[in-house]
Image: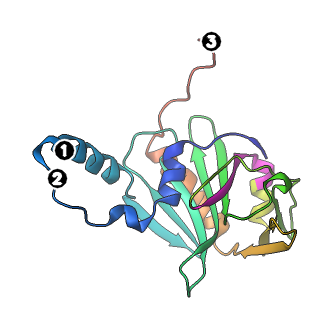
Amino acid sequence: MTSFRIPAILAAALLASPLALAAKPAPQPAQQDAQQQAAQANKAAQPTDVKDYGDWTVRCFPANKMAPCQMVQLRIVEKTKQRILGVLVAYLPARDANLMEISVPLGVALQNGLVLSSDTYKSGVLKFTRCDQQGCYVEGAVGNDVMGSLGRATKAQVQIISMNGKRYNLVFSMKGFNEAHHALVDLAKQKGGGAAPAPAGQ
């Protein structure tokens, strides 16, 4: 997996907090234009097509961008509703490329990165690209060979190391992975996904 920053709108869609949708005081007249623009942006971040494939969810968004659809699996602690793991894959039709984002809780040892593994595949150490209030993230392009290996897996996990040196294996399901990915690619192609950006200097 090589370094490749996922477009910010994809990360925003994955990491959007329910608190951001909470009711707010009625806007003053001078604020209405800004509030309307924010409402339009929020509407663009809401999925228009959502379908589950096993333990994966495929969703598409109305915004016209390079990767209109994504497949995602979130692991949530039922009692606290805290997200302990998020795995997101987006497909860029114009590049015929897959992008992956893995999110883990805060408190990880950033210098140690994380390792993605399954019964068919094991990555090297993947470096974190950023953190925010929701957690820390690894983002990168994923080759077709890696996607093929993961598609044959029956189990998978992300290994992280906490700041106190303790190792944790965050397990996620591969049930429905292939079906979700096939649907993701088909939907992304149907929705266009925009043109690939011109190379630097052109």
Q: CA distance from mark 1 to mark 2?
A: 6 Å
Amino acid type, mark 1: Gln
Residue that appears at 88% across and 60% down? 122
Q: Position of residue 15 (x, y in %)?
A: 52, 59
Mark 2 or mark 3: which is in front? 2
Crowd tier of the residue under label 1, counting other residues whose Cα lies within 10 Å: few below 14, some 14–19, many 20 or above: few
The label shown at residue 201 is 3
Residues 123 and 50: in front is 123
Segment colored magenta = 134-146
Crowd tier of the residue under label 3, counting other residues whose Cα lies within 10 Å: few below 14, some 14–19, many 20 or above: few
- Labels 2 & 3 near each other (Cβ < 8 A): no
Which mark sits nearer the N-terminus, 1 or 3?
Answer: 1
Mark 1 or mark 3: which is in front? 1
Q: Position of residue 47 (x, y in %)?
A: 40, 58
Magenta part, dominant SS = strand
Q: Is residue 102 left or right of residue 132?
A: right
Which mark sits nearer the N-terminus, 2 or 3?
Answer: 2
Task: Determine if residue 183 is in view.
Answer: no
Q: Secondary structure at mark 2?
A: loop
Amino acid type, mark 3: Gly
Residue that appears at 67% across and 52% down? 100
Q: Is residue 1 left or right of residue 54?
A: right
The label shown at residue 27 is 2
Identify the residue under disc 1.
31
Residues 37 and 199: in front is 37
- Labels 1 & 2 near each other (Cβ < 8 A): yes
**Residue 132 covered by magenta stretch:** no
73 up-or-down from 195: above or below: below
